[in-house]
Image (cartoon, helix red, strand yellow):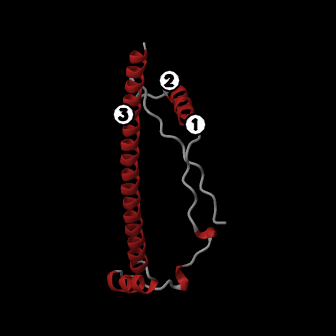
Amino acid sequence: MMRFLNILVVAALIIAAVVVYRVKYEATRHAEEAARLKLEISREREAIAELKAQWAKLNRPDRLQALAERHLSLRPLAIDQLNNLNNLPDKPFVDPDPIGSMLEAMDGSGATDPNATGSIRPTPVPSRRPQQGAR
């Protein structure tokens, strides 16, 4: 019985040693992975900082002004280009119920239109809003 107990304890110790070795190996692997990721994050941050510096250099107002003058044919705004809202044209008429207008036009014009054949009714054109005078 004592011999069986000794074999059982030795087997338990061997199993425990294997488990501890495996845990240590996994911890080492995870630590290496964490170190690799930290290095990668550091490199990405450096790349982002470099790109931000390049963006700041390219986005300088004096550089953009020189490029605009060289490549765009822009002129300063003249005072006669300004206008007020009274001189704008009226908003075009948009029928709020186009289907209803078409149905009303079909009911009124289909029976009295001499050109209607009876099989297809003519498509009505919605009436426009009367033009309002200048404000």
- Picture quadrant of residue 135: bottom right
Distance, label 3 to label 2, CA atoms, is 99 Å
Residue type indicated by callout 3: Val
Give the residue displayed 52% in from the left and 32% down from the top.
102
Element on which disc 3 rests: helix
Which residue in the structure is indicated by mark 2? 111
Would you call the spot at circle 2 few (<14 residues within 10 Å), some (14-19), or many (20 or more)?
few
Which residue in the structure is indicated by mark 3? 18
Residue 2 locus on image (x, y percent): 43, 16
Q: Is residue 52 left or right of residue 88?
A: left
Give the residue displayed 43% in from the left and 85% down from the top.
75
Q: Is residue 128 left or right of residue 2?
A: right
Which residue in the structure is indicated by mark 1? 97
Residue 95 versus residue 53 in the image, above or below: above
Foreground label between 3 and 2: 3
On residue 43, which mark appears?
none
Hey, which residue is sitting farthest right in the picture?
A: 135
In front: 78, or 4?
4
Residue 127 versus residue 53 in the image, above or below: above
Foreground label between 3 and 1: 3
N-term mark: 3 or 1? 3
Distance, label 3 to label 1, CA atoms, is 82 Å
Element on which disc 1 rests: loop
